Image: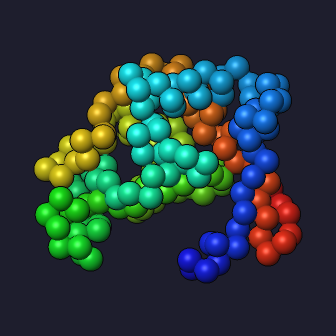
Amino acid sequence: IASFERTILSGNSPFDRFLAGDKSALGEAAQRGYKIFKDEAKGNCETCHASFNFTDENYNNLGIGMAAKSSDLGRYVVSKLEGHQGAFKTPTLREIASTAPYMHDGSQKTLEEVVAFYTKGGHRNRWLSPKVKPLHLTKAEQQDLVEFLKALSGEVTWYGKTGG
């Protein structure tokens, strides 16, 4: 799977065009969502979803799968470090609009559900990442953030063939 994934190139999304100077590439809602995404007091999304690929490549516990009778142990299975219980690798947000369902277990069906999940501060548990805190976003701010996330999807190239 990793070898295949390395052959997929993502780019030329509305966000990429916006960064390149095309200010019309992002609508007003997506631009507001981008501000929320970057704002440490609002979305604080860049704490985990940083850099060009929108991932810090780290492992975090968001509480997904921790409420089950048999908890999903995540990174702990490999590391045996107590703090890794329920921790999963932060995924890229590139092409996020095309990769539903979301979270490692597919428990979130839409981007709206994902943003609502983060707005509530994840699922509380003993090993919840300290980076995960309630966002207290209004419904309008949540929708703006979703519009920004959608703008991270663009043309995808597989094995030299372009599609979208």
Camera-side residue: 51 or 154?
A: 51
Residue 16: x and y in percent read: 74, 41
Camera-side residue: 130 or 68?
A: 130
Q: How is the image coloured?
A: rainbow
The quarter of the picture where residue 28 lies is top right
Q: Is residue 64 visible?
A: no
In the image, residue 118 above or below residue 54: above
Left or right placement of residue 14 versus residue 87 in this view: right
In the image, residue 66 above or below residue 14: below
Quadrant housing the N terminus? bottom right
For image coordinates 55% across by 46% down, the residue present is 51
For image coordinates 58% across by 34% down, the residue present is 146
For image coordinates 55% across by 30% down, the residue present is 145
Q: Is residue 87 visible?
A: yes
Left or right placement of residue 144 versus residue 69 in this view: right
Camera-side residue: 131 or 122?
A: 131
Quadrant housing the C terminus? bottom right
